[in-house]
Image (cartoon, coloured by chain):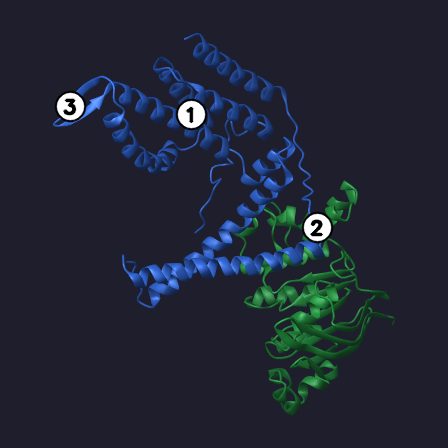
Amino acid sequence: MHIELDRYARLKSPIHSWDPRFKIISLSALIFAFSFTKQLTLLPFIFVISIIVLLLSRLPLLYIFKRLKYIALFMVPMVILLSTTSGGKVLFSLKFIPVYAQGLTMSLLVVVRTFAILIVFFVMLETTPFNRTIKALHAIKMPDKLVSILFFTYRYIYVYLEELRKMRIALKLRGYKNAMNYHSLKTNGGIVASLLLRSFEQAERICSAMTLRGYTGKFIIRAQFRACWQDYVKEFAVALVIIILLKTTCSL
Amino acid sequence: MKNVISLTSVDFSYQDKPDVLKNISFDVSGGKSVGIIGPNGAGKTTLFLLLCGILKPTAGRIRIMGEDVLYKGFNPAVGYIFQNPDDQLFSPTVRDDVAFGPINMALSQQEIDARIEKALNISGCKELAQRPSHHLSGGEKRMVAIASVLAMEPKIVIYDEPTASLDMRARRKVINLIKSERKTNLVASHDMEFILETCQRVIIINSGKIVARGEAALIMRDKELMENSGLEVPYSLRG
């Protein structure tokens, strides 16, 4: 069983067929535009836009919502903290805890913006095979070192996840149960240390393998991307949304 | 036939482990397959890393095709297939990995494509071309690792434990591939039947020294020699 970063990257949708270079540039710009929004009145707009992007991508909604669920868990304490401690006008009180209007507004802003950004980000990442995304990043002049790091991360994260899985099975078979005690802490520390050492040793062997096949410090990536008129239309549509968003943000 | 590999009085020590290899000398002529056998820790992998120029001998001389091996240099004439294919398959997809060597050799795109196709066909990995490396089985990974080296069209191919953790079908594929490719092969393996089937000659290394060399069947039939070297006579040679 593999954990996949790009399980649905081979579906058919207007977002899937979009040239990954255009997709990365456009959707990243859209994410930035979302992050600049500071008015409550614009929140429904950015949320609807992100949902439209998600629907256009034809990604299974349940799959995306499952991913967002984990983010939501992190957001709950932040919302509680902001609403009850930010000061200003008290909107109402929950027994002795005051809920501030300003805090609630800020929370709403943060929550909606975060979800809208994440939805667009997941669509950007999940609608292209990850190796093609990396090649597209290279094509749009992302620094070589960063591209190489992404390449290796994508390739070897599965190797180490598999190692980790095997180690956990080995522990289980020898009667180990995770608990909040010194023994568990020591065991988990040992696993992390072992993975680090293995990865360090393997890195040396990989380096040798690359040298033997002519690697001199620069990844030569030859990927062919060909944009068509539909790619420009999609780019234009996103640019229009960004302009409207920024213009409204500035005028309000 | 002319010698393509020539080692003269080669010594090697690691900083924390002296005398890993002592006074190693042998020649291999072109087109021959030679098995390097010996117990774990005998120095087989170290010997291979010296031949590839990854390690530098502390004494002696190593020549490949008449030229001294360039330490840490790129020599496409020598292909090394690692013991663990995960060390070798570092690109996201099979095709990218097979293309890695030819691209670094600065070949034309047409030549690169031709070599990728040829290597994938020879190794029987054509249908795996677009698959991510982490989705392959152990046997598939092994064959792709071989394809990635063959795409560079090396004159000498070094196989380090090529049948480790392979099933019988994958093992047979490797045997057929080695036998069909008319290259100079150096093969290290604990699978004695495999060595017997793929190599004309063998060299036994034990504790960093060459203890025997000669025709594969003749050397491997010698029970005393094999047992003294921590090895076993292959089943097919037992009387």
In the rendered view, tell whether residue A128 sits above or below residue B78. Answer: above
* Residue picked out by circle 1: A55
Q: Earlier in the sequence, mark 2 or mark 3?
A: 3
Query: For the residues carrying marks 1 and 3, which lies nearer the camera in this image?
Result: 3
Give SS at disc 2: loop
Labels 2 and 3 touching (C-beta < 8 A): no
In the rendered view, tell whether residue B202 sits above or below residue B74. Answer: below
Query: Visible in this render: residue B65?
Result: no
In the rendered view, tell whether residue B66 sits above or below residue A128. Answer: below
Distance in Å between CA atoms under marks 1 and 2:
42 Å
The chain that appears green in the image is B
Q: Amino acid at mark 1?
A: Leu
Chain A shade in the render: blue
**Residue located at (67% from left, 44% from top):** A219
Which quadrant of the figure has residue A180? bottom left
* Residue picked out by circle 2: A215
